[in-house]
Amino acid sequence: MQHASRNRRNPHWPVALVFLAGLFLSACTAQYPLNPGVEKIDRLEPYRVKLADRSRSRDTLLILAFSGGGTRAAALSYGILEALDLVEVPAPPENKGKRHTLLDEVDLISGVSGGSFTASYYGLRGREIFNDFRSEFLYDDFQGSLLWGLANPVNWVRLWSPRFGRSDLAQEYYDSRLFKGATLGDIAKKPGPVIVVLATEAIEGISFAFTPSQFALLCSDFDRFPVSRAVAASAAFPGALSPIVLKNYAGQCDIQTPPWIEKALASPDLASRAYYNALRMKTYLDGRRKPYVHLIDGGVSDNLGIRGILESLISRGGIHESLRELGLQNTRRVAIVIVDAKTREKARWQLLDEIPGIGAILGASSTIMINKYNFETIELLHHVARDWTRDDEIHGQQPIDFYIVHVAFDALPDATERDYFNSIPTSLSLEPDQVDKLREVASRLLYGNRDFQRFVKDLEGRMPTKPARIGRSAGEPGEGAAGPEFAVHEIAP
């Protein structure tokens, strides 16, 4: 009788138990999307086709590298695209008579973390990026939307699963908001430059490039992999976001060990960069010992988006060997524009006699390591370019002309302006005015770079002579009744 009384007082407890059981089952079954395997894959053909595009000059290779750094990096990279589209250069014979700019000459864009948003969107949309990327991403509060998603109780249940993490949730938002189900294969089929999104393999600590050759090592289908998932991996900042996991199907397709790996491993040398990279890349070829690959923010291994490409060139025997492999043996000029959005935050605690907290020290340590590694990467790039030029001269070959264009806030002569840009946070949420200032300073830094000026001169191109207007179109955030405010700068002829 007492038992019956308890049932009458709690008539809904069976429903509650069923509801809780459903939540538990949902948590257990939540699963990140697995990358599909494939039996046959061509490591280079998709890129050979794109790089052979006759709408670009055949003797010039133009590479853009977009660094990490949240929306500030995305905005600075976007400003570089705008600036390149204002520099007119002679068109190749196939496009004679048409307006042709340096943006049309871009062959490859690499993107890390924040820079991967701009690179991937441009790869999908081309010049349409100038119509909607500002409102869709740069002016939008992506960080706030991600935090709201994490606050949703429905997502709490999914996040209980050991096979669904915060980056998987972020990927879903990136896909619905920006990339609309697009895949890496969709980018590869579009006209325009090769797009390479970069992440970091969390165990070996090496750069992971979302390319057909990298996916070939995993026997995985590059064409069907979501762009949003590549970007989520590239922007998976350790701690705040979880790793993105890939399934390794190595051993289930017809891929052979790349010759450069076999050659490097045949001559073990602990001081050799090629041997170091080959030893780590070889781990992907054993799907039984390495059945899964865990990827984190690309900035951990290569925040500039150029070191992985550079080490790949070195490991394969140099610039000429790589160009021949890609069908670019007629290249006479290589220009690399590195868009570096690194921070140099003023630590207020250096003015105090107090002991800094753990958070301040950890933040400073991370910034120090990234900035030191960035400097070493730029120095290595200059060193290697000089070595390749000297080797060509020794062997009686016509040397390739290199133009290394480093776009960074350190080049600004005014200390107050440098401090302002260094103080802009690396979050995924900025004020529209901050975005516009980043767009404006991008062209100023690019046009003021001596190597860039030399590159334009050698191409017989011309930079704009009128002031550039940077601002918001009607209806975009921050545009008031009196009209938007513009940052205006003079461009040196």
Image: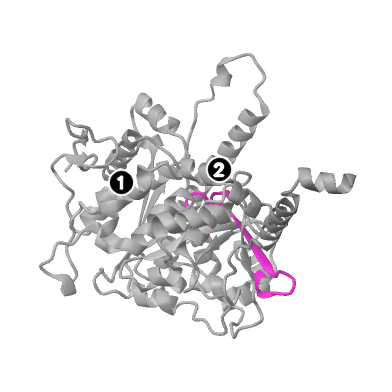
Could you tell me the amino acid type at mark 1?
Gly
Q: Residues within 10 Å of mark 1 (few under 14, many from 20)?
A: many
Looking at the image, the residue that sits furthest to the front is 1
x and y percent of residue 60 in the render? Answer: 30, 65
Which of the labelled discs sits on residue 370, or is there none?
2
Residue 307 seen anywhere in this rendered image of the structure: no
- Identify which residue is drawn at 18% across, 31% down: 481
Residue 295 sits above or below residue 362 on the image: below
Horizontal side of residue 316 vs 279, given as left or right: left
| Residue that badge 1 annotates | 79
Residue 38 sits above or below residue 128 on the image: below
Viewer-side residue, 366 vs 31: 31
- Identify which residue is drawn at 73% across, 74% down: 288
Horizontal side of residue 236 vs 139, given as left or right: right
x and y percent of residue 449 in the render? Answer: 30, 44
Q: Is residue 307 magenta?
A: yes
